[in-house]
Amino acid sequence: MKKIIAAHLTLKSEKMESFINYTKELIEKSRAEEGNISYTLYQNPTDPVKFIFFEEWMNQEAIELHFATAHFQDFEQVLANYVAEPPVITIYDIASEK
């Protein structure tokens, strides 16, 4: 069953540009993973420190493989340097596929 991940992040304002640049490689590598449908970083235009990763995956196994990749593990290690508060990450099932 397809899965959606919504990862909400609030960044330190002085870290926004370096965060966007840092995530370019993460996004590129994640999009190339088997089981990935889409992987996009969005920025709130009215509150520019607010970001969301919106990801679509073929199934839970693809997500687990993603979480185990070197590029995601590296991202987890440096994320605390960029965020002003803990991320809020939610994984959804696609209701219409149940």
Image (cartoon, helix red, strand yellow):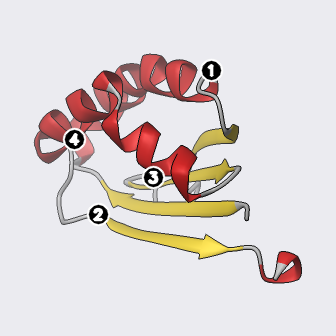
Residue located at (52% from left, 70% from top):
91
Q: How far, Cα to Cα, is label 3 from label 4?
A: 22 Å
Does 64 sit left or right of 88 as displayed? right
Instruction: State the residue position of label 4.
Output: 76
Considering the numbered disc 4 on the image, is that residue within a helix, a strand or a loop? helix
Q: Position of residue 4 (x, y in %)?
A: 63, 62
Mark carried by residue 96? none
Mark carried by residue 87? 2
Considering the numbered disc 2 on the image, is that residue within a helix, a strand or a loop? loop
Instruction: State the residue position of label 3.
Output: 48
Considering the numbered disc 3 on the image, is that residue within a helix, a strand or a loop? loop
The answer to which of marks 2 and 1 sits earlier in the sequence is 1
Whether 71 is drawn above or below 15: the answer is above
Instruction: Give the amino acid at mark 1.
Output: Ala
Q: Residues within 10 Å of mark 3 (few under 14, many from 20)?
A: few
Whether 45 is drawn above or below 6: the answer is above
The answer to which of marks 3 and 4 sits earlier in the sequence is 3
Q: Are marks 3 and 4 in contact (CB under 8 Å)?
A: no
For the residue pair 32 and 12, the one nearer the viewer reads as 32
Instruction: Give the amino acid at mark 4.
Output: Glu
